[in-house]
Amino acid sequence: MSRIQSCFEQLRAAGRRGLIPFITAGDPSPEASLPLMHALVDGGADIIELGVPFSDPMADGPTIQRASERALAAGMSLRKVLALVEAFRKTNTTTPVVLMGYANPIEAMGAEAFVAAAAAVGVDGVLVVDYPPQECVAFAGIAKSAGIDPIFLLAPTSLESRFDDVAKAGSGYIYYVSLKGVTGSAKLDLDEVAQRIPLIRERVGMPVGVGFGIRDAETAKAVGAVADAVVIGSRIIEEIEHAGPDAAVARVTAFLRSIREALDSLGEPRS
């Protein structure tokens, strides 16, 4: 059982929802990223999604685009992201880390070389936004053989045939995009989310984390009432932007704790 799968088993046994925060590696600076990863854990993170900065992040809204631009300008690269995970693992060997990004940097390194390097430093999952599940069976197999969960996106517009493709190729959890738009968008249809998640669970057989459009404790609690986990990214990046490098750790920790408290106030998850 992978660290991600074990995490969801523990959450289920405790009757709790998972909290999956996202930050972009290298933002607001490469030096600040490691303290921020630890701040996410201190704030109540169960799994960390670590963004690999990319020049053309097509699924990301302006907030995460700016974070990628700052990180790339500071010299962040895929190899430096892997080095960051390695540094994190020196003091944290339990919190799962998922790399989230795009295919180009992985293709440039080579899929097998990337997976081997990621496994060596303690990466637990990989979510490649522009890898369709039906077209990356080989990559998913390489990742699984190295103990890394390949994680895929489902959206309100996903056909049920994609559910089946994700069930075959994926493992760990499903990232359900809760709205039709990019990260940071504000129009979240909670009724639609509540209707889709049971279908996804039935067809895919994995826990479902819901992201895009979750900006505060109230919304996180509403989503947590129907999901296995809540994913928050753009709102955390905004906290980092507003706080500046010196106050980012404290501000992110405090924000995340408010989300953790809201999720923990819920009763038993829906099955």
Image (tube, rainbow, N blue to C red):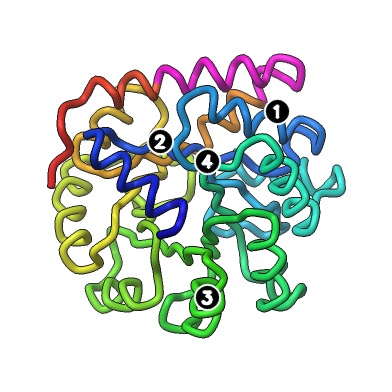
- The quarter of the picture where the N terminus appears is bottom left
Q: Amino acid at mark 1?
A: Pro
Measure the alpha-carbon separation of dots 4 and 3: 20 Å
The residue wearing badge 2 is 19
Of residues 63 and 10, the one nearer the viewer is 10
Dominant secondary-structure state across the stretch colored magenta = helix
Residues tagged 3 and 1 counted as in contact (Cβ below 8 A): no
Measure the alpha-carbon separation of dots 3 and 2: 27 Å
Measure the alpha-carbon separation of dots 1 and 4: 14 Å
Lower sequence index among marks 3 and 1 = 1
Lower sequence index among marks 1 and 4 = 1
Tell me if 29 is positioned left or right of 191 in this view. right
Of residues 152 and 118, the one nearer the viewer is 118
Q: Amino acid at mark 4?
A: Thr
Residues tagged 4 and 3 counted as in contact (Cβ below 8 A): no
User: Which-is-in-front pick, marks 4 and 2?
Assistant: 4
Where is residue 52 drawn, in percent x and y? 67, 53
The residue wearing badge 3 is 145
Tell me if 84 is positioned left or right of 2 in this view. right
Lower sequence index among marks 3 and 2 = 2
Tell me if 75 is positioned left or right of 205 in this view. right
User: Which-is-in-front pick, marks 1 and 4?
Assistant: 4
The residue wearing badge 1 is 35
The residue wearing badge 4 is 95
